[in-house]
Image: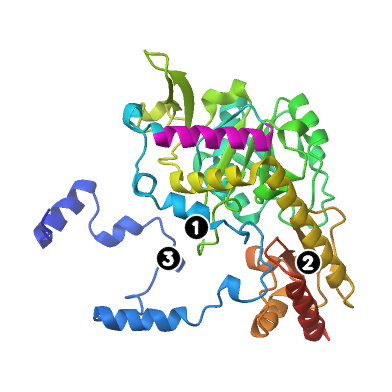
Amino acid sequence: MRYLPLSDTDRADMLARVGVSSIDDLFADIPEAARLKGLVNLPTRKSEIEVERHLNRLAGKNVAAGSVPFFVGAGAYRHHVPATVDHLIQRSEFLTSYTPYQPEITQGTLQYLFEFQTQVARLTGMEVANASMYDGSTGTGEAVLMAHRVTRRNKAVISGGLHPQYRAVVEGLSNLSGDKVVSLPADPTGTEDILAAIDGETSCVVVQSPSFYGQIIDLKPIAEKAQAHGALLIAVFTEVVSLGLIESPGAQGADIVVGEGQSIGNGLNFGGPYVGLFATKQKYMRQMPGRLCGETVDAEGKRGFVLTLSTREQHIRREKATSNICTNSGLCALAFTIHMTLLGEAGLTRLARINHANAVKLKKQLSAIAGVEVLNKAYFNEFTVRLPKPAHDVVEALAARGIIAGLPVSRLEPGKADLANLLVVASTEINTDEDRAAFAAALKEVLA
């Protein structure tokens, strides 16, 4: 297709057709304060080789996660991904395949999605899982919308331990749809009384465990009260490896389980792509967003796979759709499935135990430093510490010493003085004893 630029007359005709006088009018819904004044501060033109040189210089300023001791978690975790995973997903039949509209020629795609669903259902302790969501945050937003459809109510209660970015997604979707959200205050100690917020108008209760602050939450009493009031419990996780050691949300009574699968098979990629995991009880299956692959037999009795349910708006009338999720994270889901297959149940359990043991070692070293208070009694591979100084300043000082020390809570919860000194740190199987010792030594020096 040739590129055919529009003339001024063409643009004027298009603007008249949509009923605006200028292109600027198309951006009227964007607040004035959020708009750029003038052009972006970039050269109007550069040669290809000049651009490459400039970008390489910028990239050289980055500190790669694998080059220094690294303790960041908070929804994005650095784990070892076997080379086998990347080797297999780079095969052309996986790398270039598209959505399985024609099952007779996409049996491979449908089969690995079916296996993915099976793994997610077993991990979460639920009866059925989809394949898949964009990521954990958008999956959480979709779970709340699903709960509203099931209960025919529109009030969601959000735990103060939910990841702030997940909460923002829920609040954004709810604002657009006119639904109610009751967001409880930040809960770094895991002591909030979420049961008191549940009433007869509640559609769902959204609780993360381990929480954003690393607290392990007992979901059973929350599930009991929510269900007694006709509401659903949405259990959220950001660290899927924790399910190798902690009792599954399904076993604790959750109605919907949603979370992030990045830790399995998917490395840190500057913010994505990730893979959202979503599972529920079978009775709610038809209200579940996304797609569901199934196993069947053909006319000759041979095993085959089909796209059993697909409630996306492209497939049926828009007003009947249960989701606006327009695709799935297929390649990331495949990476998850390959890595999980390599681990197996015993391997996942062993990996989870190593993660917890490493976090215990780090907690002992950090809690021995004067002025450092660990807020968690129970945790998986992540916990929160209160420092005697603003956590942001400490992290910057440690970065200058070659230690990526964790996430200052103030970065995601700005302007809250009571959270300014809190630092969320994670220690996975990647960290060595030398890494933890270097972290503790540098922190002691910075706080002195």
- Tag nearer the camera, 3 or 1: 1
CA gap between label 1 and label 2 equals: 31 Å
Q: Residue at x 61, y 20 (%)?
A: 283
Badge 2 is on which residue?
418
Is 423 inside the magenta-drawn segment? no
> Looking at the image, which is closer to me, 248 or 37?
248
Q: Are marks 3 and 1 in contact (CB under 8 Å)?
A: no
- State the image quarter where residue 218 is shown: top right
First reached walking from the N terminus: tag 1 or tag 2? 1
- Tag nearer the camera, 3 or 2: 2
Q: Residue at x 77, y 84 (%)?
A: 446
Please, is residue 278 above or below residue 10 in the view? above
CA gap between label 3 and label 2 equals: 31 Å
| Structural crowding at the residue carrying mark 1, measured as other residues with C-alpha within 10 Å and reported as few (<14), some (14–19) or many (≥20) | some
Disc on res. 382: none
Badge 1 is on which residue?
272
Q: Residue at x 67, y 36 (%)?
A: 124
Task: Using the rendered image of the protein, determine whether residue 209 is visible from the camera's viewpoint.
Answer: no
Amino acid on which the number 3 mark rests in the picture: Glu
First reached walking from the N terminus: tag 3 or tag 1? 3
Query: SS of the residue at dot 3?
Result: helix
Amino acid on which the number 2 mark rests in the picture: Asp
Amino acid on which the number 1 mark rests in the picture: Gly
- State the image quarter where residue 68 is shown: bottom right
Badge 3 is on which residue?
32
Q: Which residues are magenta?
A: 108-125
Residue 203 appears left or right of 42: right
Residue 44 is situated, as x and y percent measured from the top left of the image, at 26, 79
Residue 18 is situated, as x and y percent measured from the top left of the image, at 23, 47
Please, is residue 130 above or below residue 134 in the view? above
